[in-house]
Amino acid sequence: MSRTHSLSERFRRSLLSLALLGGVLLGLAPELDAQSFDHEPYPKLDFNFTELELELGVQPQNLRLDAAATYQIEANVSGADTVILYASHMDISSASVDGEAAEFRMHNDSLLIPLAEAAEKGQAYEVRIRYSTDPRFGLLKNSNNTVWTSLLPRSQRHWVPVIDNPHVTLKTTFNISVPAGYTVWATGRKTGEEAVTEEVVQYQFASEAEVPASDLAFAIGNFESQSTTYGIKGINLAVEQELAGEVDLQQLLQQAYDGLGSVEKQMQSEFPYDRLNVVVLEDHGWETKSWGGSTVFLYQNRGDLQQQLLRGIIAQWIGSKQRAAQWSQADAIMVYQTLLQQSLTGETQELEVKDQPQPSRKSIYELFGPQRWNAWQQRWSRWEEQSKDWIIKETHPEMIKQLSPVISWRDYAGLWYRSSGQPMFDVSEVLNTERADTSSSGAADQAKADSVRYRVSYQLDETGEQLALGFKSVQGVYDELKMLRLHKIYGEGSETEDISFTGMTDAISVGVSPDIRTAWLEIPGQLKLKIEEHKPVPFLLYELRNAESLDQRARAAKNLGAHTDNPDLQLAITDALESGVDPEVRAALLTSLADITRGAAGTEQLFLDALRHESRVVQRAGLKALRNYPENPDIRSTVQQLTVNTDRLPVFKQGIATLSAIASAEQLEGFIADIVRRDTVGHRSVAAIRQLADEGQTGILGEAERFLDEEYDYGVRQAALNLLIEYEDTSGIWEERSRELLAESADPRIRYMVVRGLLNNRNPEIISFLEEYMEDEYDARVYHAIRQGIGE
C-alpha cells in the first residue's frame, strides 16, 4: 500500500480547482481503473517529459524492485501546478521537485506531486521519486529465472512511475543493479558495468534518441551474448544460456546486421535508435507484442527466429518510431509491417500459436498477437492474387514520412485514398475479422479437410478377376458422385481406372487380371477426403515388401493386424521382423503381431527384445504389446526398469500405461510415488499422475500441486493445472491453492488457468474471493475470464 502524505491547504485548493475545470482527478479515475486496458487516445499532458534517469535494484528471485526515478520535465501550459504519473501498486517513499521535498498523493494508481507554484509555459523542473514494488503485471519471469518486461499496454507503470503512453517520448538512462551472476540488457546503448559489492553488479544503459515511454524495456538473466558494430551504432544479441546450444549466435547476429541494412534501404531512412538489442528467450509468457524502441524479444516457441527478428527490426520504424495511438489501431501497424516483410522476403510467413490458453473472449492484446499477424499474411496473399497490394505499396515509404509518429488506421487509409481513390477506411472489411479470430492459422482448413472420411474394403472374388470395393462413411458424407483413380499393380506393369462413389455406403466392382499384386486409390487434390483402406493379406504383404514410400510400407504392416483369423500371418510377420526393416515398419509389425497373438504364452520375447531397440517408436510398440501379459513379474520388472531409466517422455508415458495394465493398483501407485519424489523436472511425474487419475486412482493427485511452482517450466505447470482442473473438485482446496498462485504468479497463463479451476468449483466463498481479487488483476484476459465466470 502506498504511503499517503497529508496535503497542504494550497494543494487541496489546487486539486479542487482542477476538478472543477473538468480536471485531473475526475478525468483520470475511469481511465486508470484496472478495467481499462488500452492506452488513452489523447492523454492530458500538462508537462513534457524529456529525460528519465532510472536507478533500479532488482531481486530476480522474488521480483522485488527498489528504485529512484528522476525526470527532467517542461511545462506545456501555464498554470499547471501538479505533476501526475501512473504508478500502479507502488510504495512511494518520497518525492521531490528541484531538490525540495514535495507532498504527494496516490489516487487510482496515479501519483500526484504538487509544485510550489503554478508553472509558466516552458518552465523546467527536476522531479525525483523513490519507491519500491513487487509487480505481478508488467514483469515476467520464467523457470530459468529470467526476468523481462512486458510490452502490453499500460505495463511500464507497474515497475516505474511514468506516463506510459505512445504520445510520450523521452531520452533515458538506466542504472540497473542485480545480483552478481546475472546480466542485464535494456533500452539504449550499454555505457558501463561495475561491481557495486561482491554480491551486486550495476549495468548502465542510455538512449540519446527519444524512445516512446510505452516501449521501455529490460531483461535480466543468464545470457550468452555477442555484439557487432553497425556504422556508428551497434547490435547486441543475448540468448538465454539454456538455448545457447540450440541457437547459432553468430548466424543470428549476421541476420540482424543484414536485416537492419535491408530495412534501412526500404525505409529510405537510418535506424532510429542508438542500439538494437535482441534478446532470445525460451518462452513467450503470453506476450503478443515483441518489440520496443531499440529492443526486440524473440521467443523459441513463437516459430522461426529469423522471421521474428525481421519483423522486430521492421518494427523499429513501423511500430516504434511510427506507432499506433492505441492497441485498437494495431492493424495499421500490422499491415505496414506485412508490406515490408513481403517486399524483403518475397513471401508471407506465419508465426506459431502454441503454449497459450485460448480464451473464448478476445482481448485487446490479440490485435498485436500471432493469430492477427497470421490473418494479415493470409489477407496479403489474397490481395496479391487480386492485384490490390499496389494500393499500399504505392504510398511506401511516404506513410512514415508524411504522417505523424502516432497514427491510426484512418490516417493510413486517408493517405491510400488520396493516392488511389480506393476507400479502405473499414478495417473489418479489409481484413475480414472473422478469419482473424481463428485459434490457429490452419485450424479451419484442417477441420474442413478432416470432415469427410470413408472406410474402403478391397475384396477379390474366387476367380481373382473381379475386385470389389466397398465404401462406408465414417465421418461426413458425399451426396453427389465423387471420382477417384484406382491404380492396379501387376507382376508386370500397372493399369489405372476411374471409379465413382456416393452416399453413406456404396459398392463398386472392377475387372482385374488374376496376377494382380495390389491396388490403391488416388484422391484428387481438390477433394477433401480421407480414406481408411482394408486390403487382403496378399495385397498388404506385397506393399510391405515393395512399396516405394516408408509411409506405405508402415501402413501395410499396421493393417496386417486386422487379419487375426489368418493362421499363417504370424510366421510372415516374424520373418519380416528378422529382415532389415525401418524402425517405423518394425513398430507397425510389432503392433500387428500383438493384435494377432493377444498375449499367447511364449510370444512375449519379441516384444521384450523391442525394449532394447534404439528407436523410440519400436520401444513404444514393444511396451504397448506387453500390456497383453498381466501377472508376469519378470515382464513387470523389465517394464519398470525401462520406464525409470528412459529419458524419452513418449516412452515413459507408454511405460506407465503398460504398467497400469499389468501391475496391481498398489504396485503402480507405489512406483509412481517413488518417481514423483525423485523428479526435479516434472514432465514425467505429471504424466504418471495423470495416467493413474485416468485409471480412476486419485490417491496421489495432490502430488501434482508441487509442480505448480514457478521453478518448473510452463509446460509442466500447465499439465499439472489441467490435471487438477479435471480431477480435483473440492472448492475449499481450490480456494486455498488459488490465493497463493494468484498473488505470486507473474505468468498470466497460470493465473488464467487458476481462475478456470476456481470457476469450475464455484461457490459463494469463491465468487466473493474472485470479486475482491478482480480489482487487482491488470491482465485483460484474466480479468475478463473472472467477469465472464461470475456473471458480471
Image (spheres, rainbow, N blue to C red):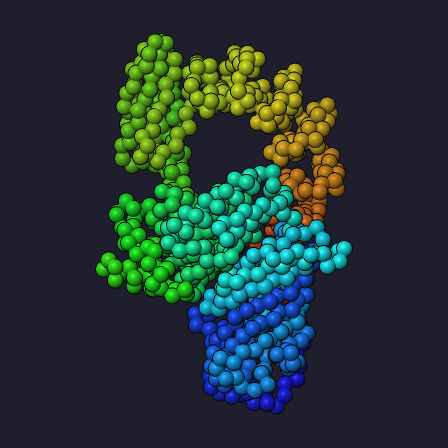
Classify residue 534 as left or right of residue 402.
right
* Residue most extreme to the left: 421
> In the rendered image of this protein, does residue 515 appear above or below residue 417?
above
Residue at the (55%, 58%) spot, across then down: 188
Residue at the (73%, 59%) spot, across then down: 196
> In the rendered image of this protein, does residue 451 appear above or below residue 217?
above
Would you say residue 570 is visible in this rendering?
A: no
> In the rendered image of this protein, does residue 417 appear above or below residue 587?
below
Q: What x and y, as percent, mark residue 550?
A: 47, 22
Would you say residue 114 is visible in this rendering?
A: yes
Residue at the (52%, 39%) spot, across then down: 251
> In the rendered image of this protein, does residue 56 appear above or below residue 268?
below
Q: What x and y, as percent, mark residue 241?
A: 63, 44
* Residue most extreme to the right: 198
* Residue most extreme to the front: 232
Residue at the (44%, 65%) spot, across then down: 326
Q: What x and y, as percent, mark residue 526?
A: 31, 35
The residue nearer to you, when weighing 635 against 141, is 141
In which quadrant will I find the N terminus? Answer: bottom right
Question: Splitting the image into 4 quarters, where does residue 455 fall?
Answer: top left
Count the marks: how many?
0
Q: What x and y, as percent, mark residue 350?
A: 43, 45
The residue nearer to you, when weighing 86 against 375, is 86
